[in-house]
Amino acid sequence: MCYFNIVRFWGDAPLILAPLAATEVAGCERNKVADIYAAIEADLQFASDANNLSKVFTGKNLGRATSLAAKALLGKVYLQEKKWQAAKQTLDELINTDNAGTHELLPDIANVFSTAPVQGSSAADFKNYTGWAPQTMNKEILFEVIFDKDIAGEGRNALTYHSNQADLNEVFKLSNTAKCIYTSDDRRADLMRSMKGTNTDNNLLVKYADIQSSLEQYGYNTPILRWADVLLMYAEACNEVSFDNSATSPALLALNDVRTRSYVAGAYTGDELSDQDTFRDAIFLERRLEFPMEMQRWFDLLRSGNAINEIAKIGLIIDKDDLLYPIPNSEVTLRNDPEKFPQNPGY
């Protein structure tokens, strides 16, 4: 996961797979993106084998990464590399063979971000946020960052998504663009309201805020991989491999599974998605509706090739050099070798 984020944010980077002596560190060079992805793939291929890592953990080990989570992440890696066939095969195995009912969409999107079970539901479908080791896990979640609700203090500031600091006020104040993409009958809209903090006028996203508890002490976990993502990744991979808008199309069925969970009347028909480009646009729109503030959108824009145009729509001008972060200047200066450790273009 760390190298996957590194390669997407910075591109070429030092690939260190074994301990180094202090004297060796300064000699590290930036390895090529392809080499980093090869190492990521190898790790995830190993971890996604149930013979090497369990499909399910229980007791005090509940919440650890499983082979199913590794396979989902491997599918995401292939997707970002645009290895469509490999992504399709990996996600197909996960959905139709390996999963065997372990993970599924919850009936209501709000339950994914709730600390309490819904009346009539199975307790096993929801998390217990008391203590570091949850007693039950949300069946939609494959992997997440776990928080302890019983620890007092400023835990809400561990991730900026949970914070309502004044200097982040504009960050968490939803733009008209973000508000208007939801229809009035889309249940996901309620999760994206900006509410006011109890002791401040600053904004706080409802999606990550337990408004029934102290703003300094709540146990909402942060999802990294969930089943809705698996389904939409599968739809994307299928569509890129071979366009199929028939009623039995795996891509259409997966897309509509996610869409109708939150927008009951919103199932797409094949006629509406009449070509591959239209189908692709529908998938990326659904991802935008489903995953705001879940660290997905920027990487979706990079994969679609639409980052520059979409950012321009909110009044910001970027160019291709801005698609990667700058390498910290302290590291560039330390190496002092433009050939082996160059700064990214444009910085």
Image: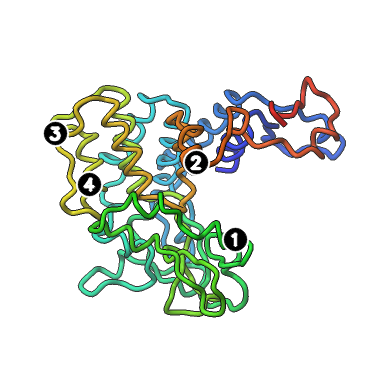
- Does residue 14 appear left or right of residue 262 in this picture? right
Q: Earlier in the sequence, mark 2 or mark 1?
A: 1
Give the SS element for disc 3: loop
Q: Is residue 122 visible?
A: yes
Foreground of the two, 277 or 184: 184
Can you give x and y, in whole percent of width and height, for residue 327 in the image? 72, 36
Mark carried by residue 215 = none
Q: CA distance from mark 3 to mark 4?
A: 13 Å
Q: CA separation, marks 1 and 4?
A: 35 Å
Mark 1 or mark 4: whose residue is earlier in sequence: 1
The residue that mark 1 highlights is 168
Identify the residue at horizontal 71%, vertical 27% (top origin): 30
The residue pinned by badge 3 equals: 248
User: In terms of depth relative to the viewer, which is nearer, 187 or 179?
Assistant: 179
Residue to which mark 2 is pinned: 298
Mark 1 residue type: Leu
